[in-house]
Image (spheres, rainbow, N blue to C red):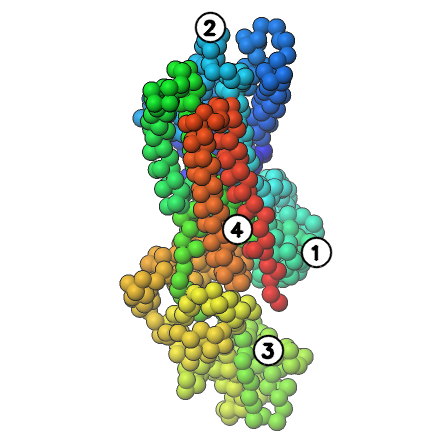
Amino acid sequence: MSNINKTCCSANKIETPKNNCCCHKHEKKEQTCCSSKGSLKGCCCSNASYGTIKLSTKLLLSAIALIISFCISHFKWNFVGFPYTDPAWIAVLLCAGDIFKGAFITFFKEGKIVTSMLVSIAMIASFMLQIFTIFGVDVGGHHESYIFVVGEIAFLMSLGEWLEERTISRTQKGLQSLANMMPKTSRVRRNDNIIEINASEILVGDTVCVAPHEMISADGKIILGSTSINQANITGESMPVEKTIGDTVLCGTFNEDSYIEIQAEKTGCQTTLSQMLELIDEAEGKKAPIARIASKWATYIVPSALGLSLITLLVARFILDTSLIEAIVRATTILVVFCPCAFVLATPTAISAGIGNASKNGILIKSGEALERLSKITTAFFDKTGTLTTGKIKVEKFTTTYPDEDFILEAVVAIEKDSTHPIAKAIIDFANTKTKTSLLAKNVQAQTGIGISGLVNDKKVEIKKAQTENSQTMSNVYIDNNLVANFYFSDTLRSSAKSSIKTLNEHGIATALLSGDNLSSVSSIAEEVGIKTYSANLLPQDKLNVINKTQSEGEFVCMIGDGVNDTPSFVASDISIAISDIKNDIAINTAQVVILDGELRKIPALIDFSKTVMLTITINIIFSLTLSLTAVMLGMFGIITPAIGAIIHNISSVSVVANSARLLNKQTLKFNKTK
């Protein structure tokens, strides 16, 4: 996490232009930091990688010391002053301190029993066995140095922690790398002069000048030039996207080939990139229900382990008739193997890896709970406009009775060319595919809600809004007061809508369309994408009624919308997914899951991926519990020693973390945008 303090990523912040960072307010004291959680090893504005390197060095030195200690004990090397000079003391001193500190501070200050408490007790018990051997007490013929056991437990626990940190830190690797690449300075045009300023000093409304092969330093719209933008770090798209005047570009994306100028609309902490970093940071701190269950059970396991250890001691001593020391050894073994570390790690490591994989592919999952809920979906409700469709109007059909079709098309372009209305743009786009326009219009006059008119080649040309009998939007074209042509309009269907609906249905998830649009438009879209159940002319309250009714029938409901008029439905549903097209703040703020590039194919893939994450958690839990219970039985009968028990216990922890880490590299969510 080195050097990521250049990016603002928390809600409680103010901008500090001098260091291009954010100040977080903690207990009325301002502190510069880049994450609400700070860092595992201190303030994140320090070089956090130092902590990771330091822990790595501890682990390396401890491993070397333990290998030497094992060889001394196992091969009975003559080592001066042993066991006082046992190299395993190095591992104890380097790794055990933090475990003891965390356990007892939490217990005495907060009254909480945590897993490190059991580990600490196990280490104390092993240390006491070593004290017995020093004073000549026969500990049952075991060859291990019990200082080696203490060091081994501390080392393997620290190794598991290091692997967990590595897994979690990799979830943000792409975004952290992007944050490191953010430009420190930017060129802006002010008072007809281009000046270079600190990137944090860009103001909303500034004209930002971006040369080829430069990173864009603010969210905004292109006002000059056309280029290709590589936005893979934000949306997960592998191919650059063509952008021209009027198109939105994002801070942190890469200008591939041409000079452009953009008008800044969001800067600093308000940019899409900063919001992404903040949301991912928040998501890692929100536990899924299954994670809370695992943590709750862990608090029961600790006293249970202590009780079982005592029972083992009593059974071994008075029923199996072993020596007191052997009974203590077996009881200590129980403490070592019963530590529920793997059980506790089973869920958060998988959740973190899942959220990290999704973020790399342009999907924001705001919490572990949201990831878990995705796996339970049985019914998916879709909004129409902006969700199944792009919200971009197109000409579906053009008819004319006028003998010169080209004149009609050229005339309407001449009249509409300066209009910003979506219907006007649709007409112009359609006409430009049919003919080259060269005519000019005079006396152009627009009447809001009615239409627009003007003179073209001394002919009066009027374009008036109308509707068909089935409520389809259309425009009538008049020449000298005579109706000569009709334009019929429809929304543009997203290219992957049909295949996404088909995949959801094949996976047993029911799909339905809820829309406030007219029945003709809704039924047409539903038929085209393969949705059999649909409702039209719905108000927000009507959508809520449908969702509530479906939930009362036992269905687990997902609402999928564009986040503008779907907020009530998002709140009412069990899980919500926003198709934001990387420009909709409302979608990012209200939905539990946000697909930034509008790629609908990611929805069924995401649901499948969430089930994979839940399966990974289940496997982790079953594996850790099975191995622990097996080791407990072996320890009760003296088949394994504390040293072997420590290895078995920590193998389970490392295995769980490694199994969760596989989720980071799954390619399930990676798609090229459909053309």
Distance from the alpha carbon under mark 1 to that under mark 4: 31 Å
Amino acid type of the residue tagged 1 in the rendering: Ser
Q: Which residue is mark 2?
A: 135
At 59% across and 59% down in the image, what residue appears?
A: 671
Which quadrant is home to the C terminus?
A: bottom right
* Badge number at residue 258: 1
Circle nearer the N terminus (3, 2): 2
User: Does label 2 or label 1 sit earlier along the sequence?
Assistant: 2
The answer to whether marks 3 and 2 mark residues whose Cβ atoms lie closer than 8 Å is no
Mark 4 touches mark 2? (CB < 8 Å)? no
What whole-number distance in Å separates the C-alpha atoms at marks 3 and 4? 37 Å
Q: Is residue 409 placed above or below 48 in the rendered structure?
A: below
On the image, the x and y values in percent for residue 282 come to: 44, 43
Please, what is the three-letter code of the amino acid marked with disc 3? Phe
Q: Closer to the camera: disc 2 or disc 1?
A: 2
Sequence-first disc among 4 and 2: 2
Alpha carbon distance from label 4 to label 2? 58 Å
Query: Marks 2 and 1, how far apart in space?
Result: 80 Å
Identify the residue at image location x=62%, y=21%.
67
Q: What residue is pinned by disc 3?
A: 430
Q: Gap in Å between the C-alphas at discs 3 and 2?
A: 95 Å
Q: Amino acid at mark 4?
A: Ala
User: Where residue 492 appears, x then y in whole percent?
Assistant: 52, 72
Specify which label sits upstream in the sequence, 1 or 4. 1
Res. 18 visible in picture: no
Q: Which residue is drawn at the image coordinates 41% and 27% (left, top)?
A: 636
Binning the other alpha carbons within 10 Å of mark 3 as few (below 14), some (14 to 19) or many (20 upward) gives some
Is residue 652 visible to the viewer in this orientation of the structure? yes
